[in-house]
Image (tube, rainbow, N blue to C red):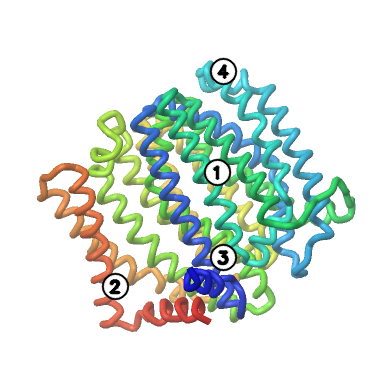
Amino acid sequence: MKSLREYLKRLTPTGSTGSQITKSLVWFGSQNAVGRVIQLSMLVILARLIGPTELGLAGIVLLALSALRRFTNIGLNEALIYQQDENVDDYLDTVWVLEIARGVLLGGIIYLSAPLVASFFGEPRARGLLQVVAIVPVIISLNNPGIVYFDKNLDFHNQFAYQIGSSIVRFVVSVGYAFIDPTAWAFVVGFLAENVTRLVLSFVIDDYRPWLRFDLDAAKELIDYGKWMTGSSILIFLNTEGDDAFVGWLIGPAALGLYQYGYRLSNAPATEITQVISRVMFPAFSKLQNDIERLRNVYLKTLRMTVLVSMPAAFGIAAVTPTFVSAFLGPEWTGMIIPMQILAGYGLLRSIGKTFGPVWKATGRPDIITKFSVLRFVLIAALIYPLTSRYGITGTALTVTVIYVFPMMPLDIYVMKRTINATYGEILYEFFYPLVASVAMFAGVWFVHLTVDIAPLFKFALLTVTGAVLYAASVLVLESQSDWDIRQNINTLVANIKS
């Protein structure tokens, strides 16, 4: 027990900026890994118990809630993190009042619009679910605003307890309810339990106690920075969840369930990577906003480690998807195999793309995110109907993926090059070796998939182990035979943790 306490104390994010970043990455990465295992386990169990139609119905409810939250996001937390002052207590009460007002407004809109949303998707049962979920924005708004220090001060050991505790509650409640009543209500009741738990934990973990005080000047200052976050938040929803809404409207809840599950499962590693990058690197980059040389060096190292993990994850998911669906989900889910393989590529592009936003926010240019999101939305809107009408959810997956390949990724790289005074070679170099290793891994895994005929569960385990071994071996060979200095990066991470 003593050694465990010493280890946890050593991992508390203190020391130099590099040490704080590394330890925060460990905590937040661990949180996301554990949280994702819990979430994916819940999704797989619910998929077996409930089926795609009921889960598509739950997806409609959560989609409506997400839309309203995104459309009213005014970037308050981002504005607090951007503040160079370590202590932002003077702003917290104002933030709390603004969030409560927003939560009550959202709850009222969701409750009153429930019949319209249900009619839009052609699913009358969504009405009752939406009216119950209307309380969630109010619950979220009451969270202790002091938890912004988890991000601002890189205190992700506290964030770990906050997120994982609520995720465990959601898993237990959702799965337990599904055994009694295998309907969309299992998903919704678990979601409610999760947010009530977070409300309680926010006051248990952080000792700040908010009051209903409002400072108009502080509000104006925060909203002035956050206005670009509002626009980008709306566009991010349209770009990342607008395809879900379109599928639910055009094809129906069953297709929506298949598409959402294909997206979640294929993008699980990318989602965790992007969350780590956005949550840890934004406050870290903010500390370096006036030192472009250090910012460039830290960014390139971040990109290197991101691609090292996300590249094999995407190739590996594409290779094992048919076996995974057969082993864990069953025949009624086979319609999501090809879309899920395509969306694995989208997940890779997302994880790379998410390294750009924290730099632009930290250097006072969140408008870049908004402007690029506008362009992406216009392109998606132009292509999604014809491709989805012709190819179903496979066409939807192609729409979002191809647009990211071109023109969005080249534009992202061009602007990042100018932001941090880097060259194309410095940025693209970080892609080469992971790509070579991932292609070699994919070829080996796909060969095993085609030639080995055993029970799906054992085959999935074999493919996973094969992929891990092949990628590790490829990385070791490339590192020893080239100037790819990945070992030094890993050693630096370990040294920062030990410091």
Of helix, strand and loop, which one carries label 3?
helix
Please give the residue where the numbered disc 1 appears in the rendered image.
377
- Dot 3 or dot 4: first in sequence order is 4
Please give the residue where the numbered disc 2 appears in the rendered image.
475
Q: Position of residue 346 (x, y in %)?
A: 41, 50
Residue 62 horizontal side relative to residue 147, left or right: left
Please give the residue where the numbered disc 4 appears in the rendered image.
119
Up-down: is 320 above or below 50? Answer: below
**Badge 3, how many Cα within 10 Å: few under 14, some, many 20+?**
some
* Residue 406 visible to an observer of this rendering: no
Q: Residue at x 45, y 48 (%)?
A: 403
Q: Quadrant of residue 66?
A: top right
Residue type highlighted by circle 4: Ser
Please give the residue where the numbered disc 3 appears in the rendered image.
415
Q: CB atoms at circles 3 and 1 under 8 Å apart?
A: no
Spatial CA distance of label 2 from label 1 is 37 Å
Residue type highlighted by circle 3: Val
Q: Position of residue 388 (x, y in %)?
A: 40, 32
Spatial CA distance of label 1 from label 4 is 25 Å
* Residue 310 visible to an observer of this rendering: yes
